[in-house]
Image (spheres, rainbow, N blue to C red):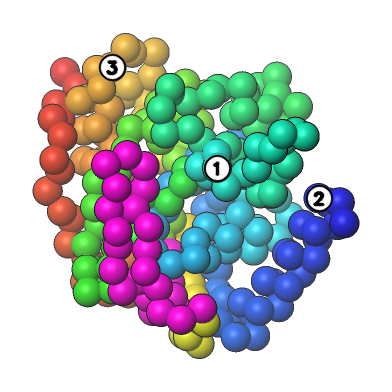
Amino acid sequence: MNYQTYNRIRKAFFKKYFSLYHRLEVKGIENIPKGPALIVSNHSGGFDLDILCLSDLCHPTRNIQVLIMDKYHYINHIWGRYWVGSGIPLWLTGGIRWRYINPYLHKNGSQYPGLVAMFAEGDSGEFKYRHLLNKFYPGAVRIALRYKVPIVPAGMIRFHKISPILKRVRHDHGPSDPILFPPITFPFKATVEFGTPFELTDYYDRSLLKEEEYWIANRIIRPRVAKILMKYQKIQLTKIDVKMKKPS
């Protein structure tokens, strides 16, 4: 089975699954611009079902390319590299590989105008910490400023109930591994809501320090995602454990 056939079957299956079993509702689709845009959402629940919904099930006519950790895109083998995932590969070290994003957000890109989504932010924590929205990283700031595209905040609702995380095994490097409930999903209603788009126009064509990028991510972008989530549950923004500075 080739990749295109596999992808069509996978999308058709999950479209039925989320429509019938989780009664997926997408709100605010009119907030997604007709042109290029960057979507920033919270991470919620296990199995990365929130990311699957965002990439495959949310927009009726356009593809949303999600930045996903490179190891989930391909398997390196002695006979070559085998692609197993969709979206845009994201490396945790070495900075953003702009050549993978250019086709969608650069004005001369082959897929322009595209929709790109950050790998879901804020950490999908254990069920008992579901009310916490953790630190956002500066990747969204760098992408939005480089391409001068609007940011669309998005809320992933009830995914922490659909696939609750019981515990996380932390590592010194890379993301933690979740310990999940047995491999089933609970039949709660899933909702994805897109908020009002905004631009970081005050910071266009400026050279920012890393601590300034963190400030924008956590003082401008994170609260807008939290505002959407607060319609459905109480949310607490955690303290930021890195140095931040408001751009002067």
Camera-near label (1 vs 3) is 1
Q: Is residue 212 visible?
A: yes
In this picture, residue 103 sits left or right of residue 240: right
Q: In this picture, which residue range is highlighted in magenta?
A: 156-183
Q: Amino acid at mark 3?
A: Leu
Disc on the earlier residue, 1 or 2: 2
Taking the spot 17% from the left edge, 62% from the top edge, the residue there is 236
In this orientation, which residue lies closer to the viewer: 134 or 61? 134
Amino acid on which the number 1 mark rests in the picture: Lys
Residue 208 is labelled as 3
**Magenta stretch containing residue 4, yes or no?**
no
The residues tagged by marks 2 and 3 sit, at their Cα atoms, a distance apart of 40 Å
Measuring from the top left, give residue 162's x and y in whole percent.
Answer: 45, 78
Q: Is residue 205 above or below residue 76?
A: above
Residue at the image point whose x is 42% and y is 34% from the top = 92
Is label 2 in a helix, a strand or a loop?
helix
| Whole-percent x, y for residue 104 in the image | 65, 32
The N terminus lies in which quarter of the figure? bottom right
**Which residue is nearer to you in this view: 20 or 165?**
165
Numbered badge on residue 71? 1
Report the side of 77 relative to 43 (left or right).
right
